[in-house]
Image (spheres, helix red, strand yellow):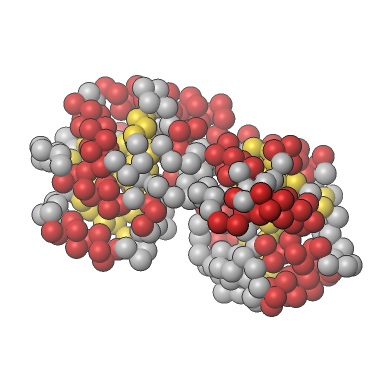
């Protein structure tokens, strides 16, 4: 039995937290015993406990990658747990804690879930060398969820041979029948004639909602266009004000936070991803693919590794609201593309992005270490 201890610093439910959740659901529990170190009071606790994943709450790590308090708190946990593998998702404090004497952990893995434009010290020759040394001291293996995330790391001095790319995976959602699709549309007061575009993301500037609203404003015939914005966040009020300013209240619909996104997905024709920061291997895009929903996405980060223009969606230039408008209009003008791209999206999902594929790859890494 290989004992794996996850460490995550998120207090809210984001991509890394969902990654752990999906992995735990299908990992071979006859071979792997998994627990998770989470910040005290994290919303992840309820989610993890609902599937039987045991958690250890820890002070000093909540939404902070590095803190002395966090290092000391994690260190005490590591000494007690004596894990074979410490798998960190952010939570740099956990990696530092493991480097202290008598931490009792055999191997450390770090997963990079996001893509950031490298800036500052770590892009200089001295900074790259420092990062290389620091990484060597605090982990044995690095996983990246896409090639763009791997490049992010190598651009800051981390050797490519220390990094393995394992794409995210999500569980297959049952394909809806026509009755379920109709009920989902009724729930959101959508007609059969509407072309429904959906974006599921926190309302944060880097998710590009402002460019989406700008794009929708440029669509000439909006009669049967519906844009569903699911999520909450710091930009909620300013985005609602922009919608009001453009008189788009009948076209752009804010759903708020959705505990269950399945009804929205059942009502959706095309997924949208408008990000210009952090996007690596979008779980929302993959969830759409599992339901034969194509995607219009920016060319930022890992998006082009998932979405291929003319195959399963359309990729447009980041922050180009005119390009986004054109892509949406093209889909509405050639509705047969929704079915064609959707079938291709599902085929790609089945062959590369189903959660069992990801989990087998992770299990292999654990066993090899």
| Count of marks, rendered view | 0
| Residue 363 visible in the shown view | no
| Placement of the C terminus among the 4 image quadrants | top right
Residue 82 percent location from the top left of the image: 85, 63
Where does the image place residue 195, in percent across and percent down from the top left? 22, 36
Left or right placement of residue 91 versus residue 295 in this view: right
**Residue 197 x/y as whole percent:** 28, 41
Q: In this orientation, does residue 282 appear?
A: yes
Residue 95: percent from the left, percent from the top? Answer: 73, 61
From the viewer's side, name the closer residue of 272 and 326.
326
Name of the residue lying farthest toward the front: 125
Residue in view at x 36 percent, y 41 percent:
318
Q: Vertical placement of 367 versus 64: above or below?
A: above
Please tell me which residue lies in front, 255 or 50.
255
Dividing the picture into quadrants, the one containing residue 96 is: bottom right
Q: Is residue 129 above or below residue 64?
A: above
x 74%, y 37%: residue: 161
Residue at x 72%, y 51% (from the top left corner): 129
Task: Say left or right for 312 vs 48.
Answer: left
Q: Nearer the viewer, residue 321 or 82?
A: 321
Q: Residue furthest right?
A: 102
Query: Residue 337 sits in which quadrant?
Result: top left
Q: Residue at x 19, y 63 (%)?
A: 241
């Amino acid at each position: 039995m290989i004992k794996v201890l996850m460490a995550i610093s998120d207090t809210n439910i984001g991509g890394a937290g969902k990654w752990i959740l999906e992995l735990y659901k299908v990992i071979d529990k006859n071979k792997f015993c998994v627990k998770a170190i989470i910040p005290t009071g994290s919303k992840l606790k309820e989610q993890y406990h609902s599937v039987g994943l045991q958690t250890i709450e820890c002070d000093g790590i909540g939404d902070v990658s590095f803190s002395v308090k966090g290092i000391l708190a994690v260190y005490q946990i590591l000494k007690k747990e004596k894990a074979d593998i410490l798998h960190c998702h952010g939570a740099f404090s956990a990696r530092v804690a493991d480097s202290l004497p008598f931490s009792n952990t055999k191997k450390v893995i770090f997963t990079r879930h996001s893509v950031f434009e490298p800036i500052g010290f770590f892009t200089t020759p001295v900074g790259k060398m420092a990062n290389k040394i620091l990484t060597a001291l605090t982990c044995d293996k690095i996983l990246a969820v896409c090639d763009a995330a791997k490049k992010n790391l190598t651009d800051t001095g981390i050797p490519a041979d220390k990094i393995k790319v394992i794409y995210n995976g999500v569980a297959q959602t049952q394909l809806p029948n026509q009755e379920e699709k109709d009920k989902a549309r009724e729930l959101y007061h959508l007609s059969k004639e509407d072309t429904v575009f959906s974006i599921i993301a926190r309302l944060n500037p880097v998710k590009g909602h402002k460019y989406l609203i700008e794009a929708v404003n440029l669509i000439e015939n909006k009669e049967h266009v519906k844009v569903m914005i699911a999520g909450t966040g710091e930009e909620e009020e300013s985005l609602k004000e922009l919608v009001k300013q453009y008189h788009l209240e009948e076209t752009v619909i804010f759903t708020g936070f959705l505990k269950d996104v399945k009804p929205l997905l059942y009502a959706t024709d095309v997924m949208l991803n408008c990000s210009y920061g952090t996007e690596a291997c979008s779980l929302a895009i993959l969830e759409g693919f599992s339901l034969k929903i194509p995607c219009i996405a920016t060319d930022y980060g890992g998006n082009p590794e998932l979405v291929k223009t003319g195959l399963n969606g359309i990729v447009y230039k980041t922050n180009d609201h005119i390009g986004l408008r054109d892509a949406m209009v093209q889909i509405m003008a050639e509705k047969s593309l929704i079915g064609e791209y959707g079938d291709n999206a599902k085929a790609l999902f089945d062959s590369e992005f189903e959660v069992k594929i990801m989990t087998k790859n992770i299990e292999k890494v654990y066993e090899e270490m």
